[in-house]
Image (tube, helix red, strand yellow):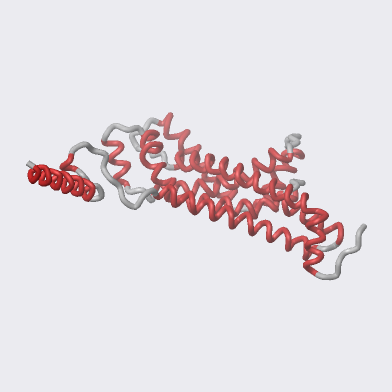
Amino acid sequence: MNSLPTQFWARVVFLLQRYGLSYLKGAGTTLLISVVATLFGCVIGFAVGIVQYVPINRNDRLIKKIPMKILKALLKIYVEVFRGTPMMVQAMFIYYGASQVFGINMNMWFAAFFIVSINTGAYMAETVRGGILSIDIGQTEGAMAVGMTHLQTMTNVLIPQALRNIMPQIGNNLIINIKDTCVLAVIGTVELFFAAKSVAGTYYTYFESMTIAMIIYLSMTIAASKLLRFWESRMDGSGTYDLATTDTLAFTSGMYPQIKDSRNAMGTKDKEEAKNE
């Protein structure tokens, strides 16, 4: 075993030279789990949020009211449990509990994706519900007035508008997942924290190893934040809009200068032709 340098930053460079690939593999695992689980969590959250928003009227038949009430109650329990308990406890409860009680030995990758996804889904469910409630009730009434069903209203009117409103929270969940995947080390997931801890245990250089891990975590979260802000700006679209119409009397103000300039050019051309004649 090579001797460690005495200087702090020299030790950091020494660890990077010997175990840089381990850090990169751990960071790649962290990023992969975070991105995939956030996407699945968003799908779960949208599904739960839509179901929670399904109206139950007095005139509905019991065959619809009772199952919907039971389903909403179960989904509410799911959301409260996974929002009210730490992910580390959830990971150990699901991974080791499934093996001990039900004899189900989960694959490490499946367990990691499953645990982070359902945890994210619980948070996203409340985010989606709040995003839908933020849309003016007139949007729903207008959709119903033209004959849309509840599903059509959700998918064509409310969800597209709610998605833009909750984009910052989706980005926030991704950043949280990048950091919180470190708890998966308790079930043997070889992510960034696990790799850093293993390197630290080799030379007892916890300060230096965790410094490297912190820099990598910070780099990933800053990059994710910049990309998500760029995506939000792209979703905002242009600051000015023009109507797509062939009626010259309905041109918007943004197009008017072009029409005015073209008319001036035509008028100048006519005057020149008159002079030549």
Can residue 30 be seen from the camera position used here? yes
For this orientation, the residue located farthest to the bottom is 7
Residue at figure coordinates x 75%, y 47% from the top left: 190
Whether residue 276 sits left or right of residue 154 in the image: it is left
Which quadrant of the figure contains the N terminus? bottom right
Q: Residue furthest front?
A: 276
Give percent across and percent down for residue 159: 41, 42
In this rendering, is residue 250 above or below 4? above
Question: Residue at the spot x=68%, y=48% of the render?
Answer: 30
Of 61 and 231, nearer the camera is: 231
Q: Is residue 78 visible?
A: no
> Where is residue 225, by image quadrant?
bottom right
Residue drawn at x 30%, y 47% is 241
Q: Position of residue 254 (x, y in %)?
A: 25, 50
Frontmost residue, 172 versus 71? 172
Nearer to the camera, 262 or 221? 262
Identify the image quadrant of the C terminus: top left
Percent x, y of residue 26: 73, 49
- Is 166 on the left or on the right of 13, as rendered? left
Residue 15 at x, y = what percent? 81, 59
Q: Residue at x 81, y 64 (%)?
A: 11
Number of marks in picture: 0
